[in-house]
């Protein structure tokens, strides 16, 4: 039996798997229920697609502006306090979305909400990396599966509300549910760096090494590639099937639902696979599988083949983002700061991916524009060795 399991005091500082899972699920629920009502929000504001798209970019912009500071905040206050505050602010922001009277105000609210969402996301991944590092198996994919499951539930409740004719009052109601769950989960978070004592005094914690390392940048590129592949499917898969392959709209929605369910399943099975073959192998195989899926969707004129390709796409990228969070947490001497850097690089894909692909789709066609994603997946496959495990519990 190792030292970690022998020490009762240390056991109490390992963190709670259930608490982290609840916080991830709450984040997914909040996002899923909000994005599911975008059509109703557009109608309420009488906005066109360009205006709405600009406003929705505010969330990503706000997140990117605050993410780089999350590591310092967690080092100073701990992820319990940081997540608790940002959960309340983010849920309040989504509740306020239901009453904004104009697109400019919606942009302001979403930028402010993005501030909190970005910090919440990084801080919960920092706690998740700590909890995982203190256990003899990979847990990060399970945590991200919790996020995906929460998003599916949130989107499903939003779809039901739309079907039942319930207005945007749904947003504050479900935001309150997410807030209660998120705060309850965060209340069981623990200090991540308790074991980093100053060798001279035996107290305090060593500060993270200054300066972004090359390893963080490379892991960030892996994570960015996965985020681009995931975001591109959510943004464009249904439209590709309808506009390029001539599928009914219902089929496009079905394919997108299948993609997200596959993401959830892929993350659930990802942990035991990583435990068996390692992160680097999973990233390499996932990149090849996702790239092949995109090529099938874009090149094969068959709806059945397109559906299979979409499932391959989702299964291939499902585990990469959480695996990158684990790899970042193991960067020597950087601790929480490395997760902050990798997350910030990755979220650039969610902000700039859709406009870039949209620009090329306008000039080359949507099917050819998605070759950009394939190129990034090839890059991700080449960088797979940087994802290898560097520590054990």
Image (spheres, rainbow, N blue to C red):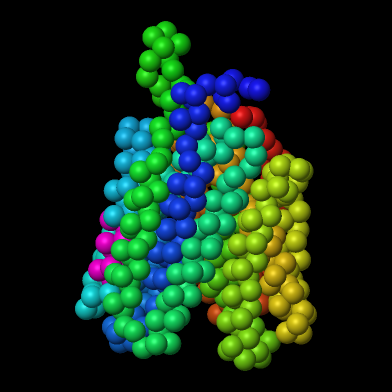
Q: Specify start and end residues of the magenta stretch as a single range.
A: 89-97
On-image quarter of the N terminus? top right
Task: Specify the principal SS of the magenta part.
Answer: helix
Viewer-closest of 99 and 344: 99
Q: Would you identify the image quadrant in which residue 61 lies?
A: bottom left
On-image quarter of the C terminus? top right
Q: Position of residue 182 (x, y in %)?
A: 37, 53
Q: Would you identify the image quadrant in which residue 256 lies?
A: bottom right
Residue drawn 44% across the image and 64% down it: 29
Please tell me whether residue 26 is drawn above or below residue 211 in the rendered image: below
Residue drawn 53% across the image and 57% down it: 146
Viewer-closest of 50 and 99: 99
Residue drawn 25% across the image and 68% down it: 96
Asked if residue 131 lies in the magenta stretch, the reply is no
Viewer-closest of 108 and 192: 192
Please tell me whether residue 5 is drawn above or below residue 376 in the rendered image: above
């Amino acid at each position: 039996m190792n030292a970690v399991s022998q020490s009762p005091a240390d056991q109490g500082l390992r963190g709670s798997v259930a608490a982290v899972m609840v916080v991830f699920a709450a984040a997914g629920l909040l996002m899923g229920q909000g994005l599911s009502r975008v059509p109703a929000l557009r109608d309420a504001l009488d906005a066109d697609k360009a205006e709405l798209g600009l406003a929705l970019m505010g969330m990503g912009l706000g997140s990117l502006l605050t993410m780089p500071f999350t590591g310092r905040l967690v080092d100073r206050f701990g992820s319990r306090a940081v997540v608790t505050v940002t959960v309340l602010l983010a849920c309040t922001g989504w509740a306020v979305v239901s009453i904004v009277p104009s697109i400019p105000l919606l942009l302001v609210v979403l930028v402010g909400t993005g501030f909190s969402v970005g910090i919440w996301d990084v801080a919960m991944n920092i706690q998740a990396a700590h909890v995982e590092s203190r256990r003899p198996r990979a847990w990060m994919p399970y945590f991200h599966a919790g996020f995906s499951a929460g998003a599916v539930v949130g989107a499903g409740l939003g779809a039901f509300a739309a079907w039942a004719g319930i207005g945007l009052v749904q947003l504050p109601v479900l935001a309150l549910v997410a807030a209660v769950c998120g705060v309850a989960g965060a209340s069981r978070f623990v200090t991540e760096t308790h074991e980093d004592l100053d060798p001279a005094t035996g107290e305090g914690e060593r500060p993270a090494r200054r300066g972004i390392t090359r390893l963080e940048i490379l892991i960030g590129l892996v994570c960015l590639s996965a985020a681009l592949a995931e975001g591109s499917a959510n943004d464009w898969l249904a439209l590709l099937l309808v506009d390029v392959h001539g599928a009914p709209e219902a089929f496009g929605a079905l394919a997108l639902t299948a993609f997200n369910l596959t993401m959830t399943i892929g993350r659930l099975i990802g942990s035991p696979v990583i435990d068996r073959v390692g992160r680097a192998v999973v990233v390499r195989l996932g990149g090849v599988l996702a790239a092949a899926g995109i090529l099938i969707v874009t090149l094969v004129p068959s709806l059945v083949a397109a559906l299979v390709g979409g499932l391959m796409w989702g299964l291939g990228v499902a585990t990469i983002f959480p695996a990158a969070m684990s790899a970042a947490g193991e960067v020597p001497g950087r601790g929480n700061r490395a997760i902050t850097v990798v997350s910030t690089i990755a979220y650039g894909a969610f902000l700039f991916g859709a406009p870039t692909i949209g620009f090329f789709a306008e000039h080359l066609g949507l099917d050819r524009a998605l070759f950009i994603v394939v190129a990034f997946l090839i890059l991700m496959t080449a960088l797979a060795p940087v994802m290898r495990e560097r520590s054990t519990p």
